[in-house]
Image (cartoon, grey):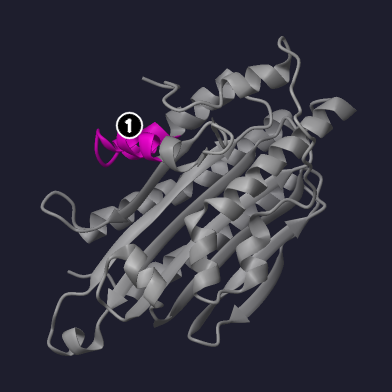
């Protein structure tokens, strides 16, 4: 049995629908704006943006399915020989109003590389799944962090006992702002190039990616409900803007998805929907040593054990 790329793409579309509905209900006032777009070189997508809600200040839940000629720089980076690609997936970033509600990101995707000459000879295509989900609190609460990591571990454990620790480390290493010597948030899981092998079929990999995708809505809407009415000060908002600045730095300097979108002539509004509406950079800002802000910085480290 072999998965069909259209089957995968259709499931990602349904995931986008379900997550948007859940977020609208949790927000209580804002609705997603849908922007259908086509890519000149092949394919297109549905960008869905929510703004100025009761809980969400700005968020995006994007679906895309694009194909065409694989650029040389991408081919070299991926170390592949095919010259045609197909990529589909869902990408999400949510920036809340309240600084005690965390930022969240998720991406689940499928990538396929095809050499038409090999395909005509019946050669096997090269394909894999990738993705991840990570949380970026402006203020880290240990109970919230433990719940997040426990939810991800439960999803991973349904498929393999080694997944969580392996993918957590991957997230710690990937979502890291080298020039700041700090993690973007409290991590989560990150994985790429999950291919078929002796242990896992490509169908099993897809089922795992589905489980990750379905984890998003119940986890994040819990945080929305838990913290949306928390009182906050101007000082808390200033800190939120600074943490958003860190988020911008990571996405523009390090994020591979952003680079891939730009290198393949993707739709710029959809690529940069991950950026917050407002952010700030104060020169050499240092929080007070006994403050909540400093406590958060102390927890923006790799290899913290949130769940055993």
Of residues 301 and 61, the one nearer the viewer is 301
Residue found 29% across the figure and 62% down from its top: 128
Residue found 49% across the figure and 41% down from its top: 175
Please tell me how crowded label 1 is: few (under 14), some (14-19), or many (20+) other residues with Cα within 10 Å: some
Name the residue furthest right. Answer: 234
The reply to whether residue 125 is in sight is yes
Of residues 240 and 11, the one nearer the viewer is 240
Circle 1 SS class: helix
Magenta stretch? 152-170
The x and y percentages for residue 254 are 52, 51
Q: Is residue 302 above or below residue 114?
A: above
Task: Give the residue pinned by disc 1.
Answer: 165
Of residues 189 and 265, the one nearer the viewer is 265
The x and y percentages for residue 256 are 48, 57
| Position of residue 111 in the picture relative to residue 115 (left or right) | right
Asked whether residue 154 is drawn in magenta, I would say yes
Q: Magenta span: helix, strand or loop, mainly?
A: helix
The reply to whether residue 26 is in sight is no
């Amino acid at each position: 049995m072999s998965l069909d790329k259209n089957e995968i793409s259709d499931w990602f579309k349904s995931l986008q629908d379900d997550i948007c509905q859940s977020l609208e209900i949790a927000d209580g006032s804002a609705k997603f704006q849908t922007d259908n777009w086509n890519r000149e070189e092949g394919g297109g997508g549905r960008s869905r943006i929510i703004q100025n809600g009761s809980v969400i200040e700005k968020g995006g839940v994007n679906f895309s399915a694009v194909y065409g000629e694989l650029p040389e720089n991408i081919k070299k980076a991926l170390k592949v020989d095919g010259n045609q690609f197909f990529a589909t997936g869902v990408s999400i970033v949510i920036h809340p109003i309240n600084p005690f509600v965390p930022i969240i990101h998720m991406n689940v995707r499928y990538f396929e590389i095809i050499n038409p000459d090999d395909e005509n000879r019946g050669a096997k295509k090269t394909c894999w799944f990738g993705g991840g989900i990570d949380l970026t609190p402006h203020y880290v609460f240990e109970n919230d962090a433990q719940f997040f990591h426990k939810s991800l571990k439960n999803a991973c454990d349904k498929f393999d006992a080694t997944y969580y620790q392996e993918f957590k480390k991957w997230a710690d290493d990937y979502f890291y702002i080298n020039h700041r010597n700090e993690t973007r948030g409290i991590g989560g899981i990150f994985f790429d190039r999950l291919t078929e092998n002796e242990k896992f079929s490509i169908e099993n990999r897809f089922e795992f990616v589905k489980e990750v995708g379905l984890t998003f809505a119940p986890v994040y809407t819990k945080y929305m409900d838990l913290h949306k009415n928390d009182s906050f000060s101007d000082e808390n908002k200033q800190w939120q803007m600074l943490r958003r600045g860190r988020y911008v730095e990571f996405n523009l300097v390090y994020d591979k998805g952003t680079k891939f979108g730009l290198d393949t002539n993707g739709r710029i509004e959809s690529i940069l929907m991950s950026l917050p509406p407002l952010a700030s950079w104060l020169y050499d800002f240092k929080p007070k040593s006994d403050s909540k802000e400093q406590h958060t910085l102390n927890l923006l480290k790799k290899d913290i054990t949130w769940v055993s």
